[in-house]
Image (cartoon, rainbow, N blue to C red):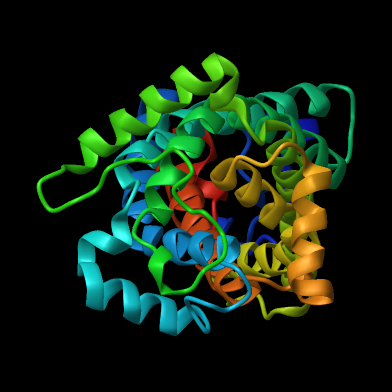
Amino acid sequence: MNRAAISVASGVTSGSGNTLDAPYIRTIEWDMMDKAKFFPLSMLSSFSVRCCLFPLTVIKTQLQVQYKSDVYKGMFDCAYKIYRSEGIPGLYRGFWISSVQIVSGVFYISTYEGVRHILSDIGAGHRVKALIAGGCASLVGQTIIVPFDVISQHAMVLGMAVHAGTKSDLNPLGIKTGPGRSRLNISIDIAKEIMQRDGFRGFYRGYTASLMAYVPNSAMWWAFYHLYQDELCRICPPWVSHLLIQCVAGSLGGFTTTILTNPLDIVRARLQVQRLESMRVAFQELWREEKLNCFFKGLSARLVQSAAFSFSIILGYETIKRISVDERYKHQIRW
C-alpha cells in the first residue's frame, strides 16, 4: 500500500488482531478504487441528488436576478409563488439542460482525484492537495458546463412575474412561452437565439465570472472539507461514524465557502441572464440597486442549497468510494 497516497488514522490493534481497532484509511485515494464500479455509481448518485435538490437552485437563481424584493420577499415566498403559479414543474425549470452537469461531474471528479494522485507523488500535504485539485477540477468542470448553465438559467427565470413590477428584463431574448410550448422547445429556442445574437461566444457569457466564483469556491470547499474532517475526527469519540463526520464536514465547508463567494455568484447569474456587458457593469448595477445588501442577496437560499448539496454529495461520494474500494483495503475502511 502506498502510504504517501493515503491518509491513515492511527488506532490500537487488539491482541487477537481485530481489524476494527487497526489503523484505518481516512481518505480513500484514486488508485484504491475499482473505476468500473465508481463511475456509473457516481453518475447515478449525482443525478439522484440533483433531482431532489434542483428546486433550491431555481429559487436561488430567481432571488439573485430580481430587482430588490419586488417579486419575492424571501426563499419560502419564492417557493410558494412558483408552486402556486406553475406547480411542481415550475420548480424544475431548466432541469434537463442542467442535468448535463452529471457528465461534467465525471470530468470534475476525475480531474480532482487525478491531480490529488499527482500531488501525492511529490509529497504534498492532504490539505494542499485538496485546495489545488479542487481548483483544477472546477476549471475543467466549468469549461464544459457553462454553455448549458447559460441556457438553463434563462429557462429558470422565464417563469418569474416580470409584469409584477420588476424593473429588470428577465426575458431579454424575447422567448415565447405558453401552455402549448414544451420545455424542450423553449430550451432549443434559447440556444438558437443566443447563437443568432452572439455566436458561439454567447454560450460562454459570464465564463470569467463563473471561474472567479466557482474555482475558488471548489478549491476552498475541498480544503475546508478536509480541515473540518480532521478537526471533527480529533474531537469526536472513536465510536462516531466516520461517514457521518465526513457529511457534517462537507456541510460546514459548504457554509463557509458560500458566505465567502456569494457576491461573485450573484454577479455571474446577472451576467448570464440579463446579458450585461461585463462584471464591472453587473456589480455597479447591483450596488446601485442594493448597496451593501448586494453581498447577501439570495444568501439564505444559497446557504440552504449549499449545505444540502454538500451533505448529500459527500454522503453519495464517500459511500460509493467505500463500495468501489479494492478488496485489499476493505478491512481498513470505517463506516
Instruction: Measuring from the top left, give residue 116's x and y in whole percent.
Output: 73, 31
Residue closer to the observer: 62 or 71: 71
Residue at point 34%, 59% (across, down): 159
Residue closer to the observer: 27 or 92: 92
Does residue 156 appear to the left or right of 104 in the view shown? left
Instruction: Measuring from the top left, give residue 328's x and y in whole percent.
Output: 51, 33
Residue at point 22%, 66% (across, down): 88
Inspect this view and state whether residue 23 appears.
no
Instruction: Measuring from the top left, give residue 215's x and y in whole percent.
Output: 74, 40
Residue at point 80%, 32% (across, down): 4
Residue closer to the observer: 51 or 29: 51
| Quarter occupied by residue 39 | top left
Does residue 314 appear to the left or right of 268 in the view shown? left
| Quarter occupied by residue 306 | bottom right
Q: Is residue 38 above or below residue 214?
A: above
Q: How many marks?
A: 0
Q: Is residue 78 above or below residue 273?
A: below
Residue closer to the observer: 58 or 175: 175
Residue at point 30%, 40% (across, down): 96
